[in-house]
Image: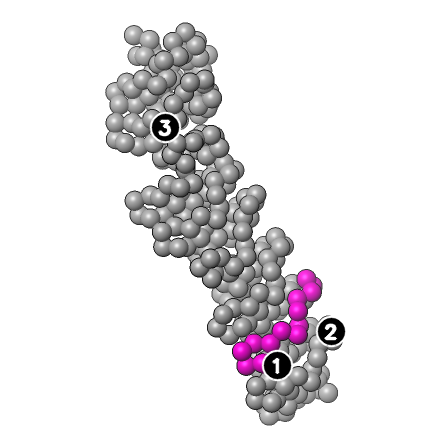
């Protein structure tokens, strides 16, 4: 009788009556009724305050599943109970949510990102779920957010306490990826969050600045220069940033670089200085700037 009455109060959202019943008979919380526990039912009814109180109740078993083998965590995500998601992230112990892979090989974080589900992603991050755990395809959450150009999701991930934005074990680097794909807003967020602005890719040995120059991204070039990126680094052809600015024939970027007094006389692998390249290309404006 108590269980039936409890479920009626859950459905109607009557928190006081629910607590009155479970305080008298706490064992009800871990009992299934038509395949679900009271906590599961409160999630299904989207009575979030009741669900949170049940989550915190002494003796509650957070590892129970319903008759369809769904966990509390899965149900909370399905029914958009984001405060419950946060609580379960922080308080579930067995199984460890961070170590769970979905049937499709995704983690909860990577699945939320691929699905474009910002609310679930935010709840997971606030719940302190590991933001650096790759899916079974060895793709990291930050990597997927950048791949799909989901700026808001990158912003949410960067709020995680232990987010890593350096070079990952699979060789992936978030800033290089964002710069290569000309994702200005994401690049700026990463730079402002302390990403290494002098990192170089494996193939061309390009830095973020070199990618920005070759993409004619004047905003990003200025941002990197303002953060004092290294202008002495060279790519696999021994080109400096000044060489690349001349090759792209971008007068504005060349002017920006020259304000920082880089060495204009270095030769690339073809033994050409930036001025010699400008001369070969009959680039009169670059010749004037470099002379």
Say above or below: 262 vs 158.
Answer: below
Q: Residue at x 26, y 23 (%)?
A: 35
* Crowd rating for badge 3 (residues with CA inside 10 Å; few <14, some 14–19, many 20+): few
Q: Which residue is mark 2?
A: 259
| Camera-side mark, 1 or 3 | 3
* Quarter of the figure with residue 239: bottom right
Q: Which residue is mark 3?
A: 63
Query: Which is more toward the observer, 131 or 146?
Result: 131
Sooner in the amino-acid sequence: mark 2 or mark 3: 3
* Quarter of the figure with residue 51: top left
Q: Which residue is mark 1?
A: 243
Q: Which residues are magenta?
A: 226-238
| Image side of residue 65 versus residue 155, left or right | left
Indicate the position of residue 110 as horizontal and vertical percent values.
Answer: 41, 48
- Magenta stretch holds residue 149: no
Say above or below: 5 vs 188.
Answer: above
Q: Residue at x 45, y 18 (%)?
A: 57
């Amino acid at each position: 009788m108590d269980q039936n009455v409890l479920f009626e109060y859950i459905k109607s959202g009557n928190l006081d009556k629910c607590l009155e019943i479970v305080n008298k008979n706490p064992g009800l919380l871990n009992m299934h009724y038509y395949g679900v526990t009271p906590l599961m039912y409160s999630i299904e009814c989207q009575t979030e305050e009741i669900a949170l109180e049940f989550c915190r109740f002494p003796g509650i078993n957070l590892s129970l599943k319903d008759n369809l083998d769904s966990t509390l965590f899965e149900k909370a995500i399905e029914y958009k109970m984001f405060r419950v998601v946060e609580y379960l992230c922080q308080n579930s112990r067995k199984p460890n949510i961070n170590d769970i892979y979905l049937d499709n090989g995704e983690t909860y974080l990577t699945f939320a990102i691929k699905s474009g589900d910002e609310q679930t992603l935010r709840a997971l991050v606030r719940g302190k779920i590991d933001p650096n755990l790759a899916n079974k395809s060895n793709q990291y959450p930050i990597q997927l957010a950048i791949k799909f150009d989901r700026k808001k999701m990158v912003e949410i991930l960067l709020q995680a306490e232990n987010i890593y934005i350096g070079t990952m074990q699979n060789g992936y680097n978030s800033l290089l990826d964002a710069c290569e794909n000309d994702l200005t807003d994401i690049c700026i967020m990463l730079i402002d969050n302390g990403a290494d602005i002098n990192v170089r890719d494996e193939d061309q040995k390009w830095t973020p600045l070199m990618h920005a120059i070759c993409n004619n991204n004047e905003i990003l070039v200025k941002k990197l220069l303002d953060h004092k990126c290294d202008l002495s680094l060279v790519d696999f052809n021994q080109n400096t940033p000044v060489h690349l600015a001349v090759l792209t024939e971008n007068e504005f970027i060349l002017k920006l670089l020259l304000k920082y007094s880089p060495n204009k006389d270095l030769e690339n692998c073809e033994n050409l200085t930036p001025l010699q390249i400008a001369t070969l290309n009959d680039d009169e404006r670059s010749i004037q700037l470099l002379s």
